[in-house]
Amino acid sequence: MFGAVSSTQLEVIDNYFKQFVELVQYKRNKFEYIESTGNAKVDKMFKEWNELIKSTEKNNQADMKVLGEIVLNLDKLEQGTYKCRVKSDTKNPMIHTLKEGINLMLDTVEKDMTRLGDTMDSYAKSDYTAKVRISPRVKDRMRAVMESANSLGETLANQAQTNLENGQSLERNSSIM
């Protein structure tokens, strides 16, 4: 098939293939290309392989860039920063889907936290009519926190009403006295 291929050339081909497998498995991030072996048929094969490997290497680099941004954004999220997004993209459908899912989660959590913060700011200004609008998709701990904020607003409103009524009663009683 290849004509006369020496055992040395077979070893070069074997090592090239192993290097490629390491690249695909993300165990290697730089590929050492071979342009010439001295065998025209093998060199032709390497030329075709090199084009495919360059494309794979480029895709791997894009994957790593997206994954790196994901790690950085998750660190920011852990610190309470929600305005970060993964901006890089990749042709890898699984990593692209992960990126989109993380960005959607960040959008949702940022909106929820903004709603919660705005409501608490209203309470701090003695406006207890504000309520956190809770999406039906919000579950578990976030829902409990938002419901607690709304409950706090109701309690503060009731206390303000009671204090107003007590003040009015004291004012009436002092007038009578």
Image (cartoon, rainbow, N blue to C red):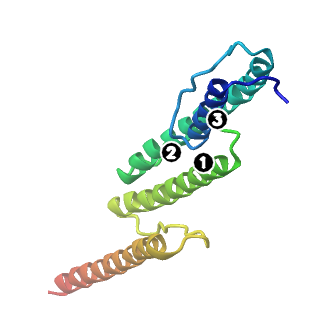
Which residue, given by chain and number where applicable, does mark 2 sit on?
A: 70
Q: Secondary structure at mark 3?
A: helix
Q: Amino acid at mark 1?
A: Lys
Does residue 141 appear to the left or right of 106 in the view shown? left
Circle 3 crowding by C-alpha within 10 Å: few under 14, some 14–19, many from 20: few
Q: Position of residue 65 (x, y in %)?
A: 54, 35
The amino acid on which the numbered mark 3 sits, given as a three-letter code, is Phe
Quarter placement of the C terminus: bottom left
The correct choice, above or below, for 121 with respect to 145 in the image is above
The image quarter in which residue 62 lies: top right
Q: Is residue 72 visible?
A: yes
Residue farthest toward the right in the current orientation of the protein: 1
Q: Which label number is shown at residue 99? A: 1
Looking at the image, which residue is at 61% across and 70% down? 137
Q: Secondary structure at mark 1?
A: helix
Residue 144 found in image quarter: bottom left
Identity, as a three-letter code, of the amino acid under mark 2: Ile
Q: Position of residue 159 (x, y in %)?
A: 31, 79
Mark 2 element type: helix
Residue at 20%, 82% (x, y): give it.
Answer: 175
- Which residue in the structure is indicated by mark 3? 17
| Towards the viewer: 49 or 108 | 49
